[in-house]
Image (cartoon, coloured by chain):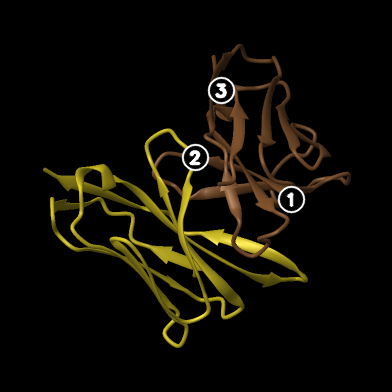
Chain colours: A yellow, B brown
């Protein structure tokens, strides 16, 4: 079983739709949960991070973490064509005495005008 | 915000030659640099982790003599692909961890697309 599971998509939605992106994980040592956005042939950029369980909102983006279910989500409201990208979840926690970050495979999102 | 400058963005080289990729953290001190390789439709694959002034730690299956990593300062790390072969063609990305945000402050470079012909 992979430490982090993420549906690769692709996910196509019409402009203005609410998008829900999700990841599940198996390592209970993960404490920080991050979402990155990656445009084609570019490096990932950090969108949001959350520590432990709870919600965090930033503009049209909301990140949710449910540690009891080992499930994290990213919601995008009023999606725009410019949101079209690959979204990677990432998690970090202590592993063998040092911080380790593990990425999901990424979900490719296409927002259709 | 934190910026990592990665060069070159694209390189084509002949089989058997070496290629050096450079990553610089522009406005923060990177205690740790990570080097990743990314295949199409695949996740980021961690190749190695390097801390400033010490030898890099390579992930299982990554040849340290082929992928030379140098992290000479808190703002500069280099990856040299030695004796490159077509199977080394890939997208290589560095990531720097901010000393002030060690748990989540991973800033990525823009990536280098290497094509070996």
Label 2 marks a residue whose chain is: A
Please give the chain letter of the residue carrying mark 1: B
Mark with earlier residue (1, 3): 1
Q: Which residue is mark 2?
A: A43
Q: Is residue A112 left or right of residue A5?
A: left
In the figure, residue A74 lies in which quadrant? bottom left
Residue with the mark numbered 3: B86
Task: Provide the secondary structure element on which disc 2 rests.
Answer: loop
> How would you rate the neighbour count of disc 2 (Cα within 10 Å): few for under 14, some for 14-19, many for 20 or more?
many
Camera-near label (3 vs 2) is 2
Secondary element at tag 3:
helix
Image position, residue A108 (x, y; %):
31, 49
A93 or B91: which is nearer to us? A93
Q: Residue at x 47, y 39 (%)?
A: B39
Camera-side residue of B116 and A10 = A10
Q: Position of residue A60 (x, y in %)?
A: 28, 61
Reply above or below: A83 against B114.
below
Screen quadrant of the C terminus of chain B: top right
Task: For marks 3 and 2, give the CA distance.
Answer: 22 Å
Q: Residue at x 60, y 31 (%)?
A: B6
Give the residue at x 74% y 47%. Answer: B29
Residue holding disc 1: B32
Residue neighbourhood size for the residue with mark 3, other residues' Cα within 10 Å, grouped as few (<14), some (14–19), many (≥20):
some
Q: CA distance from mark 1 to mark 2?
A: 17 Å
Q: Residue furthest bottom?
A: A68
Query: In the rendered image, is residue B17 in sight?
Result: yes
Nearest-to-viewer mark from 1 and 3: 1
Residues beneath discs 1 and 3 located on the same chain: yes
């Amino acid at each position: 079983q992979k430490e982090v599971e993420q549906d690769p998509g692709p996910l196509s939605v019409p402009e203005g739709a609410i998008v829900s992106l999700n990841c599940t994980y198996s390592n209970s040592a993960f404490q920080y949960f991050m979402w990155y956005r990656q445009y084609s042939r570019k490096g990932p950029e950090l969108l949001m991070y959350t520590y432990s369980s709870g919600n965090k909102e930033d503009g049209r983006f909301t990140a949710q973490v449910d540690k009891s279910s080992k499930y994290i989500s990213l919601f995008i409201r009023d999606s725009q064509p410019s949101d079209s990208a690959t979204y990677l979840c990432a998690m970090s926690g202590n592993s063998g005495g040092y911080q380790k970050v593990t990425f999901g495979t990424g979900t490719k999102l296409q927002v259709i005008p | 915000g934190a910026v990592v400058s990665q060069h070159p963005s694209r390189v084509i080289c002949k089989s058997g030659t070496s290629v050096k990729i450079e990553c610089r953290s522009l406005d923060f001190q990177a205690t740790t640099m990570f080097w990743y390789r990314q295949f199409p439709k695949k996740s980021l694959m961690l190749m190695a982790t390097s801390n400033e002034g010490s030898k890099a730690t390579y992930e299982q299956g990554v040849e340290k003599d082929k992928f030379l990593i140098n992290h000479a300062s808190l703002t500069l790390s280099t990856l040299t692909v030695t004796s490159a072969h077509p199977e080394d063609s890939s997208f290589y990305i560095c990531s720097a961890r901010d000393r002030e945000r060690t748990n989540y402050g991973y800033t990525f470079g823009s990536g280098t697309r290497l094509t070996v012909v």
